[in-house]
Image (cartoon, rainbow, N blue to C red):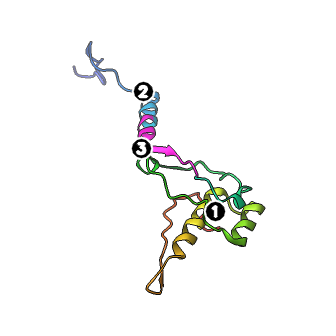
Amino acid sequence: AAGAAHAAPASGAAPQPKEDDADAVDEAIEAEVFAAYAAPPLPASLANARVHPGEISESVLLASVAAPSLVDVDPGAALEACANSGALSALQLEGALRAARRHAVVANGVRAGFFLGDGAGVGKGR
């Protein structure tokens, strides 16, 4: 009809989603895709490492596979000092330990490399 800006929905028509419904869908999708990151045990000499201040997540697929243990890696005096002073969190120390372990591998006189794929807010620059 002329002049009618909006027609009322026909009876039986699907209700329009509300913003709260969209938020619930987003949260459900996020729960299927991401899991809270659970740091592995560190060597005993790093027991004083502080908990990372940010909320860290990883994909559910990555979370389903256990990373290699780090308890047998010698962190050295520098990482122990960082743990004891609080300069690095347990999460950041984990990255340093993984890099140290990989860098120690020498094949044909060449050291292995390490790629740190952490996202924003993890503290890669520390």
Question: Which residue has dot 2 on it?
Answer: 18
Gap between marks 2 and 1 measured at Cα: 44 Å
Quadrant position of the N terminus in the picture: top left
At 45% from the left and 38% from the top, the residue drawn is 31
Residue 36, image x, y percentages: 53, 44
Question: Which residue has dot 1 on it?
Answer: 93
Q: Along the polypeptide, which appears first: circle 3 or circle 1?
A: 3
At 58% from the left and 52% from the top, the residue drawn is 39
Q: Amino acid at mark 3?
A: Val
Q: Along the polypeptide, which appears first: circle 2 or circle 3?
A: 2
At 46% from the left and 36% from the top, the residue drawn is 27
Mark 2 or mark 3, whichever is nearer to me: 3
At 42% from the left and 43% from the top, the residue drawn is 33
Q: Which mark is residue 33?
A: 3
Q: Along the polypeptide, which appears first: circle 2 or circle 1?
A: 2
Camera-side residue of 22 and 47: 47
Q: Secondary structure at mark 3?
A: helix
2 and 1 marks in contact (CB < 8 Å): no
Gap between marks 3 and 1 measured at Cα: 26 Å
Q: Is residue 68 left or right of residue 126?
A: left
Stretch of the chain drawn in magenta: 28-39
Q: Secondary structure at mark 1?
A: helix
Q: Amino acid at mark 1?
A: Leu
Classify 10 Å Cα crowding around label 3: few (below 14), some (14-19), many (20 and above).
few
Residue 35's place in the image compared with 112, above or below, is above
Gap between marks 2 and 3 measured at Cα: 23 Å
Give yes or no for residue 115 being in the magenta stretch.
Answer: no
Q: Is residue 86 left or right of residue 96?
A: right
